């Protein structure tokens, strides 16, 4: 129930509670908000006019900390940079400080014609990963952002009718994606090797338990995926067949119009093959 979320979360407030049974008490946002290791930055670009939240898995707190353009979609960070896709055809880069939190716009990166972006992941300060939805099938691409005009390198194509909602590069050099089959409306967690020949190593159909995923995150060496319809959070086994186990419910996570990101060192889970 997406309406419930918006009635419960007001701009300029903080919602906090234990990760297992969040109390949803509303308190004032503390000044100089900080990030702890593996906090999740969540962008909600459309319904609340471009708002950034910090979700803390360790205690279930959810703080409004910043804003982005209402035309912003996917986001990515490291410890010093913040990137967001703007209007599908450009990327805004900001300098980032996590403790205390501060973000300052630095530049706009132009994307060459014929490329429409969806999904964003950090490699380093001059390299990002994304997908080009202007090809059929969708192509996973690498972006050299050394200058203000990105240089695009095609890496590999997804399966037919697949679109990426979220992607990350893990510390073991794997690309993990949250993908949707746009024809059947099925959702998958997938893993690819981030080196030639860029083979797909793993795939898990999560639709039966997570029919409308908000995103995934990693903490404590575990991978979790969030169901947007009800706020249920599932732990994903790293071992085949990658079973999902219900972990807890957090109603403040209800909503599908979200984009999750974490600092790269938190992406330390590998789906074993």
Image (spheres, rainbow, N blue to C red):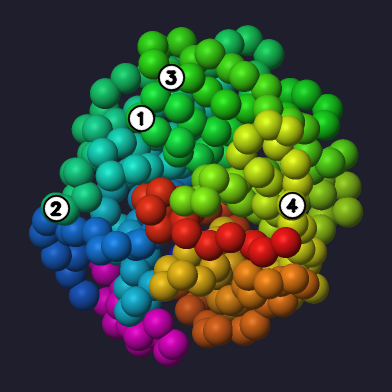
Element at label 2: loop
Residue drawn at 55 percent across, 70 percent down: 224
For the C terminus, the image quarter is bottom right
* Residue marked by disc 1: 125
Q: Residues within 10 Å of mark 1 (few under 14, many from 20)?
A: some
**Front-lying residue, 155 or 231:** 155
Element type at mark 1: loop
Instruction: Please state which of residues 36 and 26 is positioned toward the viewer in this rendering.
Output: 36
Instruction: Using residue 251 as the reference point, say whether residue 177 is left or right of it.
Output: right
Q: Label 3: which residue?
A: 145
Q: Earlier in the sequence, mark 4 or mark 1?
A: 1
- Foreground: disc 4 or disc 1: 4
The spot of residue 129 in percent (x, y) is: 55, 33
Please tell me which of labels 1 and 2 falls first in the chain: 2
User: How far separated are the C-alphas under marks 2 and 3?
Assistant: 27 Å
Q: Earlier in the sequence, mark 3 or mark 1?
A: 1
Give me the residue at 56% from left, 53% from top: 257
The residue where tag 4 is placed is: 201
Q: Residue at x 53, y 38 (%)?
A: 120
Q: Marks 2 and 3: CB-CB under 8 Å?
A: no
Which region of the structure is painted magenta? Answer: 13-26
For marks 3 and 4, the one nearer the N-term is: 3
> Rounded to the nearest whole Å, what is the CA distance between mark 3 and mark 4?
28 Å
**Extreme residue toward the left, this view:** 31
The residue to which callout 2 is attached is 100
| Disc 3/disc 1 C-alpha distance (Å) | 8 Å
Q: How many marks?
A: 4
* x and y, in percent, of residue 39 in the image: 34, 62
Residue 20: where, in percent of width, then height?
44, 87
Queried whether the magenta region covers residue 23, the answer comes back as yes
Q: Secondary structure at mark 3?
A: loop
């Amino acid at each position: 129930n997406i309406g419930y979320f918006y009635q419960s979360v007001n701009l300029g407030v903080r919602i906090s509670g234990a990760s297992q049974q969040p109390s949803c008490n509303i308190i004032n946002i503390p000044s100089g908000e900080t990030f702890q290791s593996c906090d999740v930055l969540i962008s909600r670009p459309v319904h609340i006019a471009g708002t950034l939240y910090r979700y803390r898995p360790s205690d279930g707190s959810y703080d409004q900390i910043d804003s982005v353009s209402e035309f912003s979609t996917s986001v990515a960070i490291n410890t010093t940079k913040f990137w967001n896709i703007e209007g599908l055809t450009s990327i805004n880069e900001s300098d980032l400080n996590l403790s205390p939190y501060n973000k300052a716009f630095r530049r706009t990166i132009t994307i060459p014609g014929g490329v429409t972006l969806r999904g964003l992941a950090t490699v380093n300060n001059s390299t990002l990963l994304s997908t080009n939805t202007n090809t059929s099938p969708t192509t996973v691409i690498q972006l050299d952002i050394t200058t203000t005009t990105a240089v695009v390198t095609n890496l590999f194509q997804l399966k037919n009718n697949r679109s990426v909602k979220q992607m990350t590069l893990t510390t073991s050099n794997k690309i993990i994606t949250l993908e949707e089959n746009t024809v059947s409306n099925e959702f998958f967690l997938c893993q690819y090797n981030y080196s030639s020949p860029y083979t797909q190593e793993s795939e898990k159909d999560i639709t039966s338990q997570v029919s409308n995923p908000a995103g995934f995150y990693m903490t404590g060496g575990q991978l979790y995926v969030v169901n947007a319809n009800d706020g249920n959070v599932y732990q994903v086994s790293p071992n085949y067949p990658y079973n999902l186990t219900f972990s807890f419910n957090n109603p403040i996570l209800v909503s599908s119009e979200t984009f999750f990101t974490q600092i790269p060192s938190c992406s330390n889970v590998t789906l074993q093959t």
